[in-house]
Image: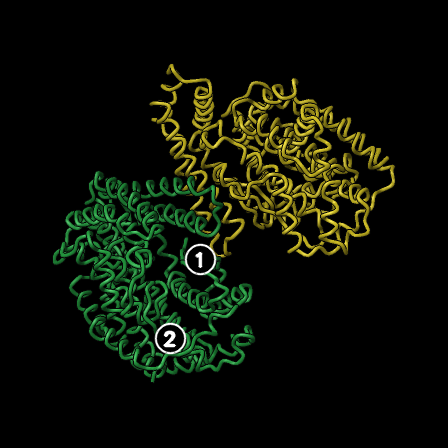
Chain colours: A yellow, B green
Amino acid sequence: MSYQDFTERMSKIADVNYSIAVLHWDKEVNLPPKGAQHRSQQIATLSGISHEMFTDPEFGKMLDDLSEKNGLDELQRKNVALIRKDYNKQKKYPTSFVIELSKTTSESYHAWVKAKKAKDYSLFREALGKLVKLKRQETEIVGYEDHPYDALVDEFEPGAKTKDLAELFADVREKLVVFVNKLKEKSQVNADFLYKNYPSGKQWDYGLKVLAQMGYDFDAGRQDVSPHPFTTNFSPNDVRVTTRIDENDLGNMIWSCIHEGGHALYEQGLPTEQYGLPLGSYLSLGIHESQSRLWENNVGRSLAYWKANYANLQSVFPENLGNVELLDFYKAINRVEPNLIRTEGDELHYHFHILIRFEIEKGLIEGSLEVDDLDQVWNQKYRDYMGVEVPNDSKGILQDIHWSHGSIGYFPTYSLGSFYAAQFYAQAEKEIPGLASQIESGDSSQLLTWLQQNIHQHGRRYTAEELCRKITGESLNFDYFMKYVESKYAGIYN
Amino acid sequence: MSYQDFTERMSKIADVNYSIAVLHWDKEVNLPPKGAQHRSQQIATLSGISHEMFTDPEFGKMLDDLSEKNGLDELQRKNVALIRKDYNKQKKYPTSFVIELSKTTSESYHAWVKAKKAKDYSLFREALGKLVKLKRQETEIVGYEDHPYDALVDEFEPGAKTKDLAELFADVREKLVVFVNKLKEKSQVNADFLYKNYPSGKQWDYGLKVLAQMGYDFDAGRQDVSPHPFTTNFSPNDVRVTTRIDENDLGNMIWSCIHEGGHALYEQGLPTEQYGLPLGSYLSLGIHESQSRLWENNVGRSLAYWKANYANLQSVFPENLGNVELLDFYKAINRVEPNLIRTEGDELHYHFHILIRFEIEKGLIEGSLEVDDLDQVWNQKYRDYMGVEVPNDSKGILQDIHWSHGSIGYFPTYSLGSFYAAQFYAQAEKEIPGLASQIESGDSSQLLTWLQQNIHQHGRRYTAEELCRKITGESLNFDYFMKYVESKYAGIYN
């Protein structure tokens, strides 16, 4: 097989995968209710075709041949090596296991839906138990050197190790939790004005302007509305975002636009000529999230950003914000408060939510925890770290869909995203002279260029660890996040 | 192979084909400009996969086995027989021919775009010549009994014969053209008020109500806007229509909604349990068009329909229609006038456009016409039948995209649609007591039920000829159309 045969094959597989992405996007944005059943079936069929194309033994042989071939340049070798690794991992799964897992996740999803509605963990317990058993089995199938949880995390954050995550979350527990508890002693900031009535048409128009200002290319994407905001892409030239509009919660729309916009800028910045290849793909969920979080928090919740934009926002909503000072607005959008639901968590408590899920997942996979009284374990952790009482399982252990999908090892990437974002942003501040004053004047173009050059254009060329070292000179270091947090929140809570 | 294996296989092929339809729909409705190239590639890849799945020799053997199998019921035998026929037809095409045709249509499309822009047929002539040569070759590959054009028409209107079409279009020439020429002596009706300013938001809302009133199920579909209105479907439970809104032309939106709504009701009425099978598919383009035309013209341009709906339309647009009497509105929407552009043709002249294309296509395929001076032939026919002078090729021979796509044999189905519609509607009037007064009171539910029971539910169970006989007791008969036309236009033009 020539390298060209390889890229053509990968391109065809990508065509199928991106078609699946179109079907999913349409499902979330447009699908009439009766269309759901056939749409699921259509997605399943294309997924089967894509899987067959990728795991074709003939393709495996081609990859072996190609990886021994001379004459490939470094980037080509990288593409082949990464695909070969993916291929070999895929081939480890016995068909019987894949079928069993697919059946179990489907059952478990339905059990979760029912249990969540009934606010009763006991309806989900058995299905979750089956799933955990299978995921433990999966760690043996995939293999690991150090900790079985490594095998699961690798799916979402290639190369990440449980050992390092455990250290990171120990920091969260020891530094962040302690810091946030100190904030509780301070007087709370007022944010009531964010929850007045904000007409949805005006919100929509404002959100489009936010995206345009970030540098999101509307000729290579579009925004729509969906119940849960998300970003998807069908090539770097068609990257779509969605937002949600709540007429009684302005922040919901603004930061979902900025967050998804950050994801989208990453996808729009991937090299088009590497379509379907690892070097044309995002690196990991953690790095993806670093881009959304960097824009959402480091930029979008900064005083500098709102110095540039607040007057305009006031002019769009004069009834609600006309009498609110910039500094009061800034404090309100950074209000810190313990809460029950992860997706509604503030910038700091968010990581408490992830900490709890990480501890539980790690325990389940290594066998130090079982599903039996997991609701009690959950509630106790929320008491210990967050200081809140979980009123029912729907607002507790059943709140997230991930486990019911069999996605164990996914949650830590959310925190990784914020921690990488802090470290990258600190570096960008060093390397871009006058970044703060650019942001203050509404110009984030140099920041975007910096992100494109340092992160986006590389695709999967480096591991997250390598990329982080290459950009910042060191591995992921939680101190950057803590420094950012301390300096920012000292200003807000004195 | 069991019948279940067969349906599962067909269902998977349908999943891929409907996925392609989603990609197309999204392309027309949503695609950002830069996304076009990869989208075309994604569609091409899925089309290749679908073609491979359908033409797999192993599948052919399965079909042979299955068609000899006992124990299938009549409907099952029908499904197998129709697919076997499709399969055998597909297999006749040598790969080299398919590649050549695909290359030529692609070139010819680009030549057409260029020529249309330059208003110069000579830039399209060579490409069209090549295409015609290939289409003549195709008639030999596919085979035919009587006339080579039969082989091409069969793709769009299975079983239709050139001989019958020639008779039909002789009727158009001798009866319809003569009738319309008599109308020219009458005084023209005024339609100016239809071209005042009609705000697009109000038009949009009105269009949705039109669809709802027809019985279009919004839980199994949705309407969007696109440059060229169309209907597509991803199952009978997800049938989508689009419309076009011109603020200075109310009729454009109203009758595109009703027309596409008619197509959509057909698709929504196909049996879901026959998903992916011939009995779950529309019968032919002519029958499809009969449904859109029946709603658009026999219902939607009737006095009865507007007796039910005109007051409401007036209340939506009081500035423009408040002082226009129902009868004047009715006359305006049925105004007859020679014109150059097929898609803008009125209910009667429309068939002159098709007559001209039929005569040219038939001539090109049988060899009595060549592409050399085809623009002159075109212009002469417009002079002869329509009494108009073609000012340039862009408004003449280059106006339609179809030939550049290699779609020769498609145009006649448009006229067949109207003629079937007239015959079916005459029958419906006989069988549904009080149909006219139901329409006058805004209730078309019995008509829809009649169409569902007589046409929609059967899919491809009968040929168009069989279906027409089954419903009306006779073959397609042009007299029904003429009778409808004469009685309606006598009222409008005295």
Measured Cα–Cα span from mark 1 to mark 2 = 30 Å
Camera sees residue A166 = no
- Foreground residue among A438 and B120: B120
What is the x, y in percent for residue B291? 35, 67
Can you say which quadrant of the picture contains the N terminus of chain B? top left
Circle 2: residue type: Arg
The chain ID associated with circle 2 is B
Could you say whether the residue bearing mark 1 is in a helix, strand or loop?
strand
Q: Is residue B336 left or right of residue A286?
A: left
Circle 1: residue type: Arg
Residue count near mark 2 (Cα–Cα under 10 Å), binned few <14, some 14–19, many ≥20: some
Q: Is residue A69 left or right of residue A201?
A: left
Q: Are marks 1 and 2 in contact (CB under 8 Å)?
A: no
- Foreground residue among B478 and B198: B198
Q: Residue placed at 20% from the left, 65% from the top?
A: B165
Please tell me whether mark 1 or mark 2 is closer to you in this view: 2
Could you say whether the residue bearing mark 2 is in a helix, strand or loop?
loop
Asked if both marks, 1 and 2, belong to the same chain, the answer given is yes
What is the x, y in percent for residue B174? 20, 74
Q: Residue placed at 71% from the left, 46% from the top?
A: A251
Q: Say if B487 sits above or below A215 in the image.
A: below
Residue count near mark 1 (Cα–Cα under 10 Å), binned few <14, some 14–19, many ≥20: many
Q: Say if B334 sits above or below A180 in the image.
A: below
Q: Residue placed at 69% from the left, 28% from the top?
A: A422
Q: Residue placed at 36% from the left, 54% from the top?
A: B275
The residue identified by callout 2 is B335
The residue identified by callout 1 is B240
